[in-house]
Amino acid sequence: MTSGIEIASEDLGTRGAYRAQVPGAARPAELAWIARGNTRIATRTYVPPEARGQGIAMRLVEALIADARAKGFTIVPQCSYVEAAFRRHPEWAQLLAPAAG
């Protein structure tokens, strides 16, 4: 279903996003983040209604995970979708930012 969907990454230093153009949708699917030092706070995930249920949001999260591994940053899953994805994938636990406190 999502095999033809390409993920683009935008990194503006203090914020960025992963985006996927969805055929027939007015706006792209997006996972937005904010940088805090060597941590990326995943703030929101959006998939157009006509494209939901096709695995696009997970593809966006997987792009974030791949970049965290390649670039050495940790992740705070502030977005409920990203948080749920981390619960489903305990093998990603080493990429979670340490809890503040």
Image (tube, grey):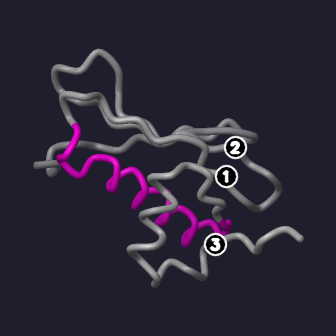
Mark with earlier residue (1, 3): 1
Circle 2: element type:
strand
Residue type at mark 1 is: Ile
Q: Where is residue 83 in the image (x, y as percent from the top left)?
A: 52, 61
Q: In which quarter of the image is the C terminus?
A: bottom right
In magenta segment, residue 56 = yes
Q: Give me the residue at 44% from left, 52% from top.
A: 81
| Residue furthest out toward the right | 101
Q: What stretch is highlighted in magenta?
A: 52-74
Mark with earlier residue (2, 1): 2
- Residue denoted by label 3: 96
Q: Give me the residue at 38% from left, 73% from top.
A: 88
Which is nearer the eye, 7 or 43? 43
Mark with earlier residue (3, 2): 2
Q: Where is residue 54 in the image (x, y as percent from the top left)?
A: 17, 47
| Mark 3 to mark 2 CA distance (whole Å) | 15 Å
Q: Say which quarter of the image contains residue 28.
A: top left
Q: Give me the residue at 23% from left, 21% from top.
A: 25
Which is nearer the eye, 10 or 1? 1
Look at the picture and state if 84 lies above or below 43: below
